[in-house]
Image (tube, grey):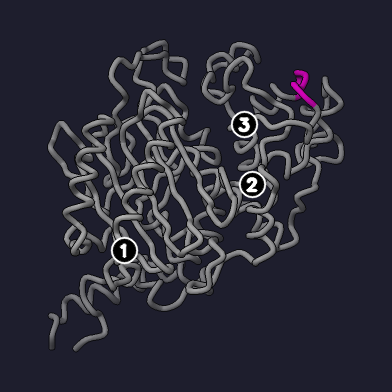
Amino acid sequence: MKYPLIKIFIFFILILLTQPIFDGLSEIEEHEKVAFITPLNQRLDNSLSEFNNSKYIDYQMKRFMLRTELVGVTLAVVKDEKLVYVKGFGYANLEDSVEVSPAHVFRIASISKLITAVAIMKLVEDDLLSLEDQVFGENGIFNDSVYLDIKDPHLKQITIKHLLNHTSGWSQRYGDPMFVPLSIARKMGVEPPVTVDTYIRYVVSRRLSYRPGTAYSYSNMAYVFLGEIISRISGMPYEDYVKYKILNPMGISDMHIGHSLEKDKLLNEVTYYEQKGSLQVRSFDGSNVHVPKSYGGNYIELLGPAGGWVASAAELIKFITHIDGFDYVPDFLTEESINTMTQQKGNPLGWKDAYNGYWSRTGSYAGTAAMLKRMPDGTEWVFIANTSSWKGPYFSKDINYFMNRIVRKVKKWPEQDLFYHYNYDITSN
């Protein structure tokens, strides 16, 4: 036999152990079930993306990282829905000289909103939800008695669609509520850490900045509410619903809601670094200790649906191939749902921008800078860094400019599809 019997024995033991998961995932093809034993990103390494233009990309990435002071980056490129390139650059952990590989997972910040939007559209397709459903008030989803003492009657006009496209009526005039949890706790008279319940009671006790649907103002809080809605409608915790009903059917098994503290990070998660001169802040949990924003300043678990997911470049771009409207890989959502998300006259659902076949989503906060893009010629890419920039969300313009140079230069990508790369053929004998 080509492989020792012990490998075959271990494989079938793992199949038995994971069968309860597979039983609930009937849509997954057999080769995708194998991937749950070793997730896609953990089957890949940097050497698989060596090709004629590798040195050019390496050189340009080194220059870009040096100029922008990035510690580590992961990059994935899809062409015609085939994973043709995935590679890590720099360090996942600078102190221990651990280099970035495709196996590493990174916080993806607001790219998480795209995942949440897809989950909402899936509930809509299953007739469990409508984009026009009311969120607050007696006839709303949040109709608990403790939420019915509403100060601004316009709050009852907020729909699911308003939450998705950032037109709910909340502004960031006095800062983003999701990034000042201690202030919210103080205003609501509760002990930190705050909860989703705290934020719902907060918004019903205050007036809106504008009538829902009449203006645009980016809202992380709206997506945190969407996560709670997904949980209420599905009867499952938000993360479980996304994993078992969205990601697993796509063959994705190493994406998770991250953690606020460094001691709780995943085994294959990178370390996060902030731009020079960053100040420490009080911990979100009210412990009165000062911490880096990237490790305890931001409440990652609560941000979950708006900015808490961690992912590898390989699995994140696989997620995109299932919602991109191209024909090579069957889409997870219907054509109608994909069009609804991307054809919203300047306010796409989940996506940051969608125009002329160019769809993009960005994400940034302390310790993270990320961007993904879908292009009409079938090229798609994901760029994630474990370092934040002093430019904040505007750093995505630099990433976009850099990646546009790469895809213009590289006319021919490798003839391979790393989505189907396995370390050994379990069927051989």
Q: Quadrant of the C terminus?
A: bottom left
Q: Is residue 328 magenta?
A: no
Spatial CA distance of label 1 from label 3 is 39 Å
Spatial CA distance of label 2 from label 3 is 14 Å
Residue type at the position of mark 2: Pro
Q: Which circle, 2 or 3, is nearer the viewer?
A: 2
Residue designated by label 2: 348
Give the number of the disc on residue 411.
1
Lower sequence index among marks 2 and 3: 3
Lower sequence index among marks 1 and 3: 3
Q: Position of residue 262 (x, y in %)?
A: 31, 31
Q: Position of residue 263 (x, y in %)?
A: 30, 32
Residue at the (32%, 71%) spot, across then down: 417
Residue at the (53%, 15%) spot, across then down: 182
Residue type at the position of mark 3: Ser
Lower sequence index among marks 1 and 2: 2
